[in-house]
Amino acid sequence: MCYKIIFGLANVHCSNFLQLSPSSHTRGHTYKLYKQRSLTSTGTAVFGNRVINVWNNLSQDTVDFSIVKRFKSPLILSDLSEFFYNMISL
């Protein structure tokens, strides 16, 4: 869903949920997201804040952002288990 929002494939305005980091401050892929600081548990449970760590840890070498199918394929082989505990505990 994050991919679809960023690349305009969902009927949602990206700026309502996600904000791209300035390109001069990114390492890795060029579609890193800016994570706003949240002082409440409700703020950390919002979709945008939950997916940012996972999204930003994707490597350009592993993920091809050109089309959805090429984006999804390497994700199946990726170990994202370090993020599951944090998402479940919310």
Image (cartoon, rainbow, N blue to C red):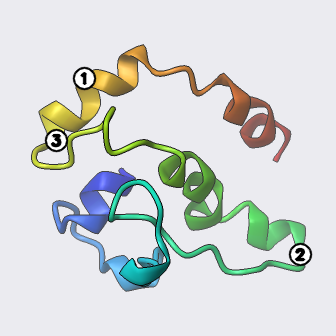
Label 3 Cα crowd, 10 Å radius (few <14 / some 14-19 / many 20+)? few
Q: Image point 56% across, 46% down: which residue?
A: 54
Which tag, 3 or 2, sits closer to the chain's start? 2
Near-viewer residue (24 or 82): 24
Label 1 Cα crowd, 10 Å radius (few <14 / some 14-19 / many 20+)? few
Nearest to viewer (mark 1 / mark 2): 1
Q: Amino acid at mark 2?
A: Thr
Q: Position of residue 41 (x, y in %)?
A: 88, 66
Q: Position of residue 65 (x, y in %)?
A: 20, 48
Q: Position of residue 21 (x, y in %)?
A: 46, 78
Q: Element at badge 1?
A: helix
User: Badge 1 is on which residue?
Assistant: 73
Q: Image point 21% across, 40% down: which residue?
A: 64
Q: Image point 46% across, 74% down: which residue?
A: 18
Residue reaching furthest to the left: 67
User: Badge 3 is on which residue?
Assistant: 68
Indicate left or right for 39 with 87 as reference. right
Indicate whether 31 appears above or below 62. below
| Residue 77 picture quarter | top left
Near-viewer residue (12 or 35): 35
Q: Amino acid at mark 3?
A: Val
**Real-space Cα separation, disc 1 to disc 2, in angstroms:** 35 Å
Q: Element at badge 2?
A: loop
Q: Amino acid at mark 1?
A: Ser
User: Badge 2 is on which residue?
Assistant: 40
**Real-space Cα separation, disc 1 to disc 3, in angstroms:** 9 Å
Residue reaching furthest to the top: 77
